[in-house]
Amino acid sequence: MNGLIYWLDMAGVIVFALSGVILACRSRMDPFGMLVLAAVTGIGGGTLRDLVLGVRPVFWVTDPTYLWVILVTVGLAILGFHYIHRLSRGFLPVADAFGLALFVVIGAHKALQLGTSGLVAVLMGMMTGVAGGMVRDMLARRVPMVLREEIYATAAIAGGIAYVGLDAMGAPVPLAIALSLATTLGLRLAAIHWHLALPTFAWVVIPRSPEASPPPGEEVASPAPRRTAAAQGAGAHDSPRPVTAQEEPLMSRPDIHTRLLSWLALCVLALQLSACAVQPSDADPAERHRLAAEQIRATYEAVLPELSTGKRRHYAQRLYRVTGDARYLPANREYMAHLGERLKAEIAELAVPGQVERLARQSVEGYSRRTEKQRARAEMFAEWEEIAYARGLLFRLVQAHYHGMLDEIPGHERALEYLGDLPWAAFLSDPEVLGVYAAQVANQVHFLHQLGVMDLRREVEAAFRRRYPPDTLATLSTAEYRNWLYGLTHFVIAASRYYQQEVDAEAYAWVLESFEAQSGRILRDATEDIQAEVALSFLLTGREGHPLVGRVRDALAAAVDPASGMIPSPDGSTDLERGEHRNVLAIMVLGWQGRLYPGPLM
């Protein structure tokens, strides 16, 4: 969906840049003048919007593609100068109308992504659509279209209201875009064709009736004699005669509509200046972090129904636990219903002879081998075949436990007994396993304890520290280093029952001290998801004020791609499905509220 928004934005830049080129040609400007008008029209409104919303740097600085598009548009226009020169005068307002409609959608969408109110989003849509054209017209010494008679800003406002209203009602984004475009474009084209305008107010002078008596102390002049043309020329510098009159406002039609729109433009300018004055500066990182979290959240919640069931569960479960927001309950309940049915069927199969062995083989054979890390894990599971299946059962049982539904699963005791008979101590303490599976080892040792199967926490922590002694960390490859970091974070995260309760900082001081000692390399070599989990380890232990938390937050906020509204993968991918884990962790770190909510319970 963000790809659609991005290409609509590009289309708007092209159309508005072309309108700037057309006006430059008609104003007999040189190629540099054409480039200036194309640029201010194409990116002027979006630049002002980003400045008002506090987006730093503005969109075309982080993505120079916009500038290249403008350069190519101007270059092609110069090559086709004779064709552009022959375009009818009606083409410019039509092209401007299309650009206006596109930019209204883009401005409103971006404002909503940043967590603004609906009113602000409507104004940002209007500003994005109107501001560039105003500057274009003023540079060409023309009355800006927004200050002329036909409906212009009103069309932009109507389109913005349509988009924001449909978004608030939960309409699909493509539908909101289509209806907003139709609203703005329809109103603007109708105004051009039929010269539609809003009614305006004008102050007119109505002379008093000659029979009326003047108020005390007020002079009434006698009617002036009719003057000849010669007399008029001779008396051009005479003082005007005194006139007694009564002024009263009357409603008139489009003749003085410009005045009303001029006041509207002044009000918008005042709003822009006041908004700029209160925008958080770079010295206000907390607000910058919050806006980054809201941008990522808006991106994902626009497509949440389109994500897979597992990703919806992962996203909704975590955000419920750090916000308590009821909007995340439906996805959690959907997952719990599915989980309950699966566990009932799975536990019934445990009693079937040979079924566990078959499931274990399927788990090993079906394990992904796309990356080097996955291939190493597949080889590991080939040696621990039954664990390959049991780890999934363990995960599903602990999820049922977290949601308060384990006791309702028939035969769950049989499943716990089955897990208790497996060689977990040997598996979780194996140096080879720890070398490729550290985070999952930390998870599983805590899951086993939380379900009451066995307590291997101290034993496995000791094995982990033996596998990664401090004096060897500098020699680890990047992949090995990330595995070590990932394992450390999950000792804390799993102990919190996955963001349901705070963790004793003293019990995991060895983890936090390791992070402190490695802070430089963490920021240099760790991926954004691992950095986020490092910060979450401090947050879960009540140490939000630690300097490393602030540095990770700065890094995560800076990593957000304005075009896609998310943190891309290390290779630049903006696939929302694959990037969900990384981005939900970023939302949690950047938007941390300091309170945890267990469950949700069934």
Image (spheres, helix red, strand yellow):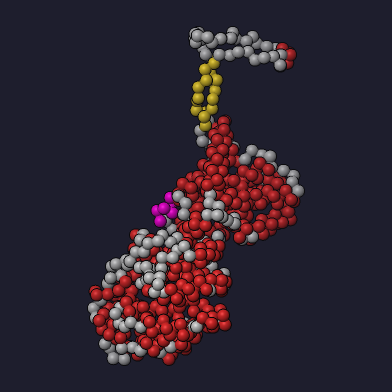
Which residue sits at x=53%, y=62%?
A: 554
Within the magenta stretch, is there residue 482?
no
453 lies left or right of 483: left
Which residue sits at x=49%, y=57%?
A: 286
Answer above or below: position of 29 versus 374: above
The one nearer the camera, 238 or 514, is: 514
Within the magenta stretch, is there residue 168?
yes
Residue 309 shows up from this direction: no
The one nearer the camera, 250 or 80, is: 250
The one nearer the camera, 588 or 522, is: 522
Give x and y (percent) for residue 249.
50, 25
Residue 310, quarter of the rendered image: bottom left
Residue 561, quarter of the rendered image: bottom right
Residue 254, quarter of the rendered image: top right
The one nearer the camera, 406 or 151, is: 406
Q: Which residues are drawn in magenta?
A: 165-170
468 lies left or right of 58: left
Give x and y (percent) for residue 282.
56, 55
Which residue sits at x=58%, y=14%?
A: 243
Which residue sits at x=56%, y=80%?
A: 474
Answer above or below: position of 245 versus 169: above
Number of numbered tags placed on the structure image: 0
Quadrant of the image for the C terminus?
A: bottom left
Give x and y (percent) for residue 569.
53, 70
405 lies left or right of 493: left
